[in-house]
Image (cartoon, rainbow, N blue to C red):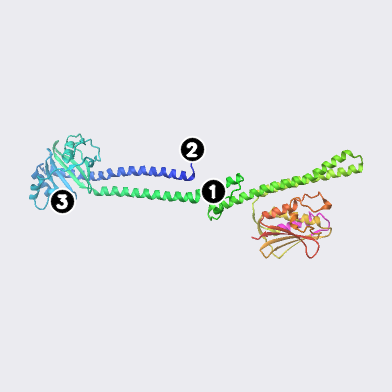
Amino acid sequence: MFSKYLKTLSILKKFLFINFIIFTIIGLFTFTYLNNIHPSLIKKKSQNHTNIINNTVDNILRLDVKFQSDDIRKFLFSTRFIFQNLDRVIFFDDQLNLIGDTDTLDLDPRSFSTRLDKIEFESLDNEEIEKAIEEKNIKIDKKKPVSFKDILKNYSSSEYLGAPYTFTQEDFNQFNVTTIKNVTKNEINLGYVAITENANEIKTAIDERKAFVIRTAISVGFVILIFSFVLSRYFIKPIQNLVGYTIRIKEKSQAKPGIENLKKRNDELGLLSNSLEDMTNELQNRVTHAENFSTDLVHEIRNPLASLKSASEILQDTNDNEQRNKLLNILSHDVQRIERLITDYSQMLKDEVALSKEKMKKINVEPIIQSVVDDYNNIHQVKKGIKIEYKNDGKEEYYINGIENRIEQIIANLLDNSISFSKDGANVFVDVSVNKKNQISIKIIDEGQGFKEKDTSRIFKRFYSNRPEKFGEHSGLGLNIVKNLVELHDGEIVASNRIDKAGAMIEIRLPNV
């Protein structure tokens, strides 16, 4: 249930919710710690008091000191160095009468007797009395003011008589810890000893811890608030813009993309925005390319289909054998033309799929071109007497980022095209060099009739063919495939007629790496 709820939240809400849970858990542990540190510190005081009381009782019993004012006074004067680190040590007899108090000790022994009778028990507010570290079931009437004597009475009548009992008193300026324990001899209760010590360091330590926790909580909360703002401003909002961008693309909305600012960022989100836009543009180009190609293919197929339909209709009505043979030749020619268009189109689609899977790498095109030229001279020569000559500007390495078999395909297609326009015994030249723009220039030069088109860029369009004497024998996709492969390698291809003599030249320019 919790995980399902968490999945429905946004990233910012998840971040705040998780921080709230962690903050709450830490707060509970801190609260428990602060509640435990208070009795823990008091317990240390109580143990120290208990040790002093036990040592004092041992001395009293060993010296056989009577629980009377005179004896206790003499004992206090003789052993007052034992209590010099304590604020106050008080003695009571078994009737709860005050018989000794270190607060009455000074340099004049007579002051002890004169001041002892004037000491009164302080009245304590009920709110100032806390339970001992060791749980003591000492009953106190909370409706009445509580005095030290009341506590002694309840302690003397409780079942915990004989064990030390500690309680605390707190006012505006002081935090006192008091421990009481009765003194027994031969199982007879002689009286009580109480030690009261100022323990402001406990209160200070607890207050410091509380202040530290509060400051830490405020600081952490402030940091979380700042981080939440940064997360929302610089991460969540840009991601939402990217989501909106993909939705607009999906819905084919005409609204502006809204990621121009993201593209200017130099971090991962900027890279993601640029990559996403490039991928979207590439997909849109592919879709447009496929739509245009399909439209062109349908248009190209429509002509031979119309010719097939007309020829088949005439064929049914003619009895002239010569005319029938001509019509049958037309039918066969149109069928071959349709088959060639579909075959070339199918091959082009396969090539595009293969291209999407192939990886670019740094390659040297010089041995690749040399290998294709040698193959055509030795194996693939289609016209007798045609020789392909290869030359370069003296270098042996021309590196590009590309796909080796696609470079072979480019050169082979261009050589096929040049050979088809060349006469028997002509030459075809392949020239490789580095131009002034530091581009690798590959020129295919023939001695054919040259281009008749004023705009030579038309020859790279799909299904374009200027071969009236061989109409239907070519699909017009060869040079278009070459152009697409060159652009895949971030290059450019241009066609022109030779200046020095008849013939055509096609130049490919690829980035030099």
Label drawn at residue 81: 3
Question: Image point 53% across, 54% down: which residue?
Answer: 267
Q: Label 2, on which residue?
A: 4
N-terminal of the pair, mark 3 or mark 2, is: 2
Asked if residue 497 is positioned above or below residue 166 in the image, the reply reads: below
Extreme front residue here?
255
Disc 2 to disc 1, C-alpha distance = 25 Å
Question: Which of the two residues, 248 or 163, is positioned nearer the viewer here?
Answer: 248
Question: Image point 19% across, 45% down: which residue?
Answer: 196
- Give the residues in magenta: 368-387
Label drawn at residue 241: 1
Residue 321 part of the magenta-drawn span = no
Q: Position of residue 468 (x, y in %)?
A: 83, 52
Q: Quadrant of residue 440?
A: bottom right
Relative placement, left or right, of 108 versus 339 is left
Q: Position of residue 105 (x, y in %)?
A: 12, 50
Label drawn at residue 223: none
Q: Disc 1 vs disc 3: which is toward the camera?
A: 1
Disc 3 to disc 2, C-alpha distance = 70 Å
